[in-house]
Image (cartoon, helix red, strand yellow):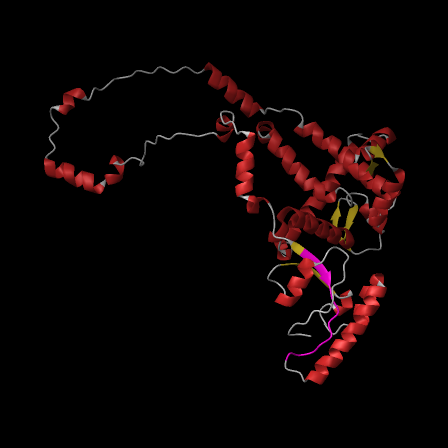
Amino acid sequence: MFDFVHEKKRLVQIVLALIILPFAFWGVDSYNQSGNTAEVAATVNDAKITQQEFENALRQQQDRLRQMLGANFDAALLDNPEMKHAVMDNLVAQRLLVERAKAAGLAVSDEQMAQVIQSIEAFQDNGKFDKKRYETALANQNMSPLMFEARLRGELLGQQLRDAYVQNGYASNGVTDNVIRLNEQQRLVSASPISFQPFMAQAKVDEAALKKYYEQNQKEFQVQEQAKVEYVKFSVDNLLAKVEVKTEDARKHYDEHQSDFGTPEERQAAHILVVAAAAAPQAEQDAARAKAEQLLQQARKNPAGFAELARQNSQDPGSAANGGSLGFFGRGMMVKPFEDAAFTLKQGEISGLVKSDFG
């Protein structure tokens, strides 16, 4: 056993850490917190491991596996006798470890406890220990500071005993004897070179045998396909340094390609529609025109009230609620009479009546 610890010291440290982590917050002292009346799951010497402590261990192990495995986690991993037995073995080992540490006279001072607690990031604010954050974090885990510190003291006590083994080297008598024996051994080695040249004259291979071997082992005579490529690289940055563009040439190019440097003209307009179909009787069209004339006069008297006038009177369902606004539009997007009127107006100007197929 000592041979293994000596040769695999780093591996033993990792294994011990994985065994101990699940019990960092509910270890040795959890039995004292739960009371003697709880159902007993196991007895270690004179100390008892309660059923509640065992279930807490299972739950903690499940949480740790969920974090490690992520989407691959399966709750059924812990729902088998082997896993439950392993969790119980870990609890027993932890209890024995702490008892052995106490028997060896090991202890954890209050100063050591304070240093460990203050170094835990979960209890820090901007790198400094925060008592309020400490108490809040424990409360979220249904744990008081006294309970946490008692469990942490037991964990640190066990850690002292583990460190005494994993941070020191041991060699058994058997290992020592083997090392001495190997160092004192000597080997006498003689070599007899055998040249292949004398055998070449005796080897006779006909064409048929060569062809057969080749056909059966073609991969031995193949190499990866390769290609030799030549290319010329043109750098835009290098070419730009050699190009000189005259101002008159740039102006000429701009004048000849003005459409490349702009966007088609657009207008933003609002309207009030009085519906009158092109095929409607003349009397109906006259009535629509009269109403439109009346609205036009009101708009010109009070241009600022155009939007409210449109909301109350426009029969265009798409724009009336927006105060008659049609947004931005370019040429070819509206009916011809409306487009011509819109693109001849100046900013803020109100046109006369415009007749289209809609009214």
How far from the left and from the top, in percent, is residue 303? Answer: 83, 62
Residue 335 appears in the picture as rendered: no
How far from the left and from the top, in percent, is residue 28? Answer: 78, 43
Give the number of marks.
0
Left/right of residue 93 with respect to residue 219 in the rendered view = right
Q: Nearer the viewer, residue 27 or 254?
A: 254
Q: Is residue 324 above or below residue 40?
A: below
How far from the left and from the top, in percent, is residue 61? Answer: 69, 49
Q: Nearer the viewer, residue 2 or 142?
A: 142
Q: Is residue 271 above or below residue 232?
A: below
| Residue shown at 86% from the left, 48% from the top | 139
The rendered magenta stretch, by its main secondary structure, is classed as: loop
Quarter of the image that includes the N terminus? top right
Q: Is residue 272 magenta?
A: yes
Residue 294 appears in the picture as rendered: yes
Q: Is residue 271 magenta?
A: yes
What residue range appears in magenta? 267-278
| Residue shown at 82% from the left, 55% from the top | 38
Q: Is residue 336 above or below residue 243?
A: below
Q: Is residue 225 above or below residue 328?
A: above
Q: Nearer the viewer, residue 295 or 150?
A: 295
Q: Nearer the viewer, residue 307 or 99?
A: 307
| Residue shown at 11% from the left, 30% from the top | 204
Which quadrant of the structure image shows residue 296? Answer: bottom right
How far from the left and from the top, in percent, is residue 138? Answer: 84, 45
Which quadrant of the structure image shows residue 358? Answer: bottom right
Which quadrant of the structure image shows residue 164? Answer: top right
